Image: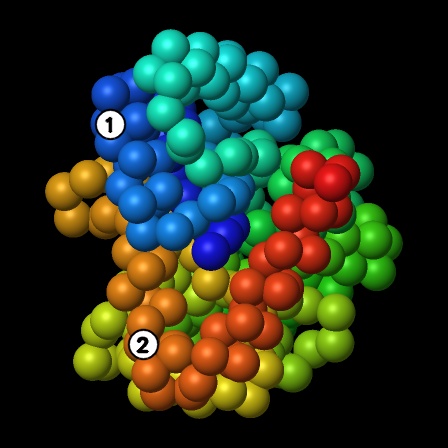
Amino acid sequence: MIDIHCHVLPGIDDGSRNVEMSLKMLRESGRQGVTWMCFTPHFYADMTDPDRFLKKRDEAAILLQQHMEQAGEPFPRFVLGSEVHYYRGIGKSEDIRKLCIGRSNFFLLEPPFRTWSSTFLEDVRTLRDELDLKVIIAHIERYFDQDKHLVQALLDEPGIYIQTNGESLLDRKTKKKVLNLIKDGKIQFLGSDCHNMEYRTPNLEEAGWVIEDKLGPIVLERIENNSEALIKEAAQL
Ligand SMILES: [Fe+2]
C-alpha cells in the first residue's frame, strides 16, 4: 500500500515529536504493508513562507534518513510533500507550487476550518487552471457538515482529486458515506494522516480491509493504482 498523507517527519509540526517516534511509525507502516509514503507536514502561510518551510522540512528528512540507514531495517521509501492549509487567494501565489509532492504536480490542500464559501472553490479552480496543479483535497470526511452544494461541486469538479483518511473507514459516523464515494470514484486517494503512535497511528491496513470487504479487491486496487501513479510522478520512477 501507499500512504500519501502522513506526519512522520520529526519535530516539524504536530506530528511525530522525535526521530524515535518517526521510526516507530515507519516500522508500523511497513508492517502493515506500506511500501511508499509521502511525508506531508502542515504548511500554514501565516506562520512561515515556502522557502523557510522547505529548509526545515528537508533538514528533518535528512535527519530521519540518517537514522533509517543506521537502523538498517527495510523501511518504506518516501517522498517529501506538504499539506498546505488553504488561504484566500492561494491560487495567485506562484511560489506555492514548491510545496507539491516530490517532483509531481500533485498538491495536497487542507480546506478551511471555518465555513466554506464559494471563494474556496474558485481558488481551488485557480490552482488547477493557472498554476496547473493537481489539487488533492485532504480528508474530505471532515467537511461533510459544510455547505452541501459546495462539497458536491468539489466532488464533481473535473481535475480535482479527493483524499480520505483511513480513520473515516473505521468510524461508524463516516464509513458508509465514504464507502459510497469510493465506490462512485469520487474519492481517489487514501492516506493514514498518522501523527503519532498513540491515537493517530498508521491505519491503512485496517482501512484497506474495510474497502476490500465492502467493495471488493478491485476497488482497493483502483485506489492503489492512483497512488502508484502519484508516486511514479513524485519520485520520477
Ligand atoms: Fe494531515
The answer to whether residue 50 shows anywhere in this view is yes
Quadrant of the rendered image containing residue 211: bottom left
Q: Hey, what amino acid is under mark 2?
A: Val
Q: Are marks 1 and 2 in contact (CB under 8 Å)?
A: no
Residue depicted at x 59% and y 22%: 54
Q: Nearer the viewer, residue 94 or 67?
A: 67
Distance Cα–Cα, label 1 vs label 2: 27 Å
Dividing the image into 4 quarters, which one contains the C terminus? top right
Mark 1, Cα crowd under 10 Å, few <14 / some 14-19 / many 20+, is some
Q: Which residue of the protein is positioned furthest toward the left in this rendering?
A: 198
Q: Nearer the viewer, residue 128 or 237?
A: 237
Secondary element at tag 2: helix
Vertical placement of residue 160 versus 32, above or below: below
Secondary element at tag 1: helix
Q: Is mark 1 within 8 Å of ligand 1?
A: no
x and y percentages locating residue 225 in the rendered image: 62, 65
x and y percentages locating residue 33 in the rendered image: 38, 51
Vertical placement of residue 156 versus 92, above or below: below
Q: Is mark 2 within 8 Å of ligand 1?
A: no
The residue under label 1 is 21
Vertical placement of residue 194 versus 63, above or below: below
Q: Nearer the viewer, residue 231 or 105?
A: 231
Residue depicted at x 47% and y 28%: 47
Mark 2, Cα crowd under 10 Å, few <14 / some 14-19 / many 20+, is some
Residue depicted at x 58% and y 35%: 79
The residue under label 2 is 210
Answer with mark 1 or mark 2, whichever residue precedes in sequence.
1
Q: Is residue 231 left or right of residue 67?
A: right
Q: Hey, what amino acid is under mark 1?
A: Met
Q: Is residue 187 left or right of residue 104?
A: left
Quadrant of the rendered image containing residue 125: bottom right
